[in-house]
Image (cartoon, rainbow, N blue to C red):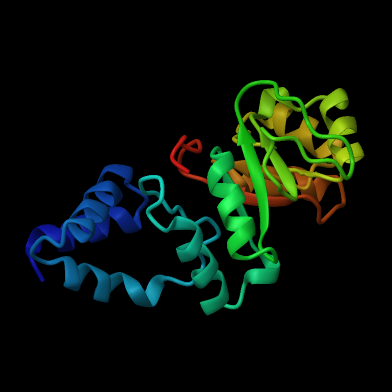
Amino acid sequence: MIAASESLLAAARKGDKRSIARLLTIVENDEPGSADVLRALYPETGHARIVGVTGPPGGGKSTLVSRLAAEYGVTDRCLVASFSADFLRRLRECDADIASSFLFDHPVALPESGQRTPLFPPVDGIGPRRDLVAPPLLAQAAGAGLTVHPWTADNPEEIQRLLEYRVSSITTNVPDVALALRAQAGSTDPEVFAQEAPPSRAP
């Protein structure tokens, strides 16, 4: 293994984000030492909760996501979230059994129960930016039969507010804080997902 990769691996294991980013670049670009990096890290994998898939429109992302879910046997317990209504429509056509969530960072009109609108994709849930979650949105989502999965809540007061609203899941950069607050409430809901960065607008 290349010495630089060994030092990057050591730093990455300690949580250094720059080292993690550099290792990702080495593997993505198939640079010298990329196979060694993968061999070194593979035994430590298996605990991922969020998987990102990006690519150009029409690049086959929905097919890839469907096949990955089937290959890993998680079709019935994964949630695919995207800002792209077109991607979510294609995913539903590709595999209607995969739950999906429409991400948004501005107010949107939700469909009424049992009715789809041309601009709103056929999804099982919504992923509003954390500050958009309020009783009127929750009532609209419930009326439309949609689960609610806000992102990215890091402030303890904000996490507490979302827990009190009983959303379906919370995406956060501080999962230990969210899990502790959830435990204090004596609940096992909602699901808490760790995230290194806010969702990007890539579908």
Q: Residue at x 59, y 40 (%)?
A: 85
In percent of width and height, residue 150 lies at 68, 37
- Using residue 120 as the reference point, say whether residue 111 is left or right of it: right
Q: Which residue sits furthest front?
A: 118
* Residue 79 seen in this snapshot: no
- Image quadrant holding the N terminus, namely bottom left
- Using residue 160 as the reference point, say whether residue 58 is left or right of it: left
- Residue 144 sits in which quadrant? top right
In-front residue for pair 188/144:
144
Q: Residue at x 58, y 56 (%)?
A: 91
Q: How many marks?
A: 0
Classify 68 as above or below 104.
below
In percent of width and height, residue 172 lies at 59, 41
Classify 137 as above or below 70.
above
Classify 115 as above or below 7.
above
- Residue 107 sits in which quadrant? top right
- Residue 154 sits in which quadrant? top right
